[in-house]
Amino acid sequence: MPFRSIPKRGWRVSAVGFGCYRVRSQPTLHREALLKAFRSGINVVDLSGHFGNGDAEEAVGQTLAKAIDSRVVTRDEVVLITKAGFINPSDPRKPPLYSLDPTSIESSLSNSLSRLRTSSVDIFMLNSPERLMQNTNKSSQSQVFEALSLAIEHLETEVSRGRIGSYGIASNTLHLPSSPDFLDLQKYIQERAAVDRQNWVSLEYPFNLFEREAYETRPSQSADINWMSAWENAGFFQFTQRPLNAIASGKLRTLRTQQHSNPSDPNSSENARMELVRERMQKVSSMETELQFSDFDVSSKFIWAHTLAENFGPLADNPFALEYFLSQRVKPALREDIAALLDVAPHMKDWAESYERELTQVSELLVALAYDRTVALNEELLGVLRALVPNKIARSDVEGTGALKNLEQFAIRTAVSALGVRGCTLVGMRTPAYVDSVVNAVKLMNGSEVIFTADDLKHLLSCPLLFY
């Protein structure tokens, strides 16, 4: 495992970190993956208090305690990152609120420390301050700067109290001057040049094959700028996120070539799946029609076959959004509708169970279809990328590492190479197999780190398939 050093602290951190956005305390597979990561040399864990409404921190707290007790790691060897800004609602079905008020930050930190079962975190980040410019009462940039100053003043207090080792800022717009909610940290720092930044050690932002603005030198108002170099010169250690989940042409593009389905399954082809979807949809639609002839007032709510058919087209190329729509919108609403039906017609229980089962199977088929369509696009992209760096592919094949044989590893190697010693790439790896794949993408060969050179990256990031 290659390692980096955080300049203002001297902490030794792995080149890749364990991202916890979708980690939960159940299934146990997520916790097993984190233990595997620790054993593989990964010592950075990235969290936020609102991930899973706090459950991600619970999972990490349990796993870290177990790893320490079993001497897999010591607490000092792990760089623990969490964040504040988003506030968990009392109703988990509602979206989180947002605040950078010092009182809110203090409360968020206390809750995080409790869930993580630790007295301190190493890096505590203000998460997405640009959200203040998106709220109903939109703040101006100067108001955001003032909120940042008050928050940072409080974080200095938390450093003094020993509850955090340092702090940073995580933002999706640090590198996007054209964005309406661009967080201009350079301007903020210039306006507050006298402020001591010794405890402000890091920044976090997205970087992947499609979102590469931070790496590329681009024109700005005064002069051309390379954000990664500018932040390095300002003394910030950089964490990049979402190497496998890109925003491309306004859609979320999952950069994976692992099929969602089993290729040996005779029903795994797109045509076979579409036929299964049609059959299931017809059955669901027939059940809905059957219900329409009843006298139940709630029967008009059961039009889910039409709802799924209407939304699949726009979401077919965006499997993550489709999965979210089905799990967070359709599933809860369907259960409410079924509960309302059974309140007035308890004898319809068998019908309701059959209807929910059929609709669940249709949903799973639609998600598999969407993912496999993305895989086909990614296989095409991988083939072109491999052709652009033939020497690296030849070396990988000769060594038998297989480190560049799928798009996931290719994307991770690209992100790690772009950052170099300036930072750490945060990757979601919720199974032990994912951990192995990530480690294989970056592991040392004959004691040296194998990365893409600047010329390699120039060729790769100019790939035409990355521009639409």
Image (cartoon, rainbow, N blue to C red):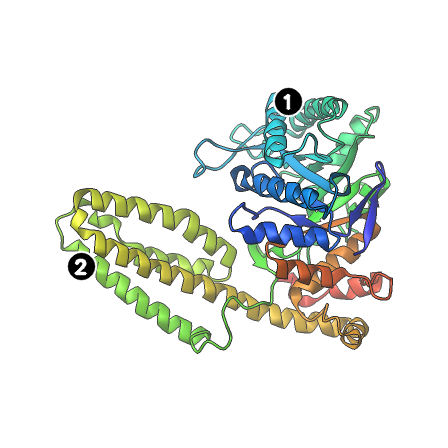
Amino acid at pointer 1: Pro
Q: Is residue 96 left or right of residue 107?
A: left
Residue 41 spot, x, y in % from top left: 75, 53
Residue denoted by label 2: 290
Could you tell me residue 402's position as x and y percent?
72, 71
Which three-letter amino acid code belongs to the residue tagged 2? Glu
Image x and y of residue 435, in percent: 66, 58
Q: Which mark is residue 102?
A: 1
Q: Residues within 10 Å of mark 2 (few under 14, many from 20)?
A: few
Q: Residue at x 20, y 49 (%)?
A: 299
Residue 187 spot, x, y in % from top left: 76, 33
- Identify the mark nearer the N-term, 2 or 1: 1
Q: Quadrant of the N terminus?
A: bottom right
Q: Is residue 84 left or right of residue 358?
A: right
Q: Residues within 10 Å of mark 1 (few under 14, many from 20)?
A: some
| Cα distance in 3D space between marks 2 and 1 | 57 Å
Residue 20 is at least partly visible in this image: yes
Question: Splitting the image into 4 quarters, where does residue 405 fall?
Answer: bottom right
Q: What residue lies at 69% left-to-right and 63% top-to-bottom?
A: 409
* The one of 274 and 83 positioned closer to us in this rendering: 83
Element under label 2?
A: helix
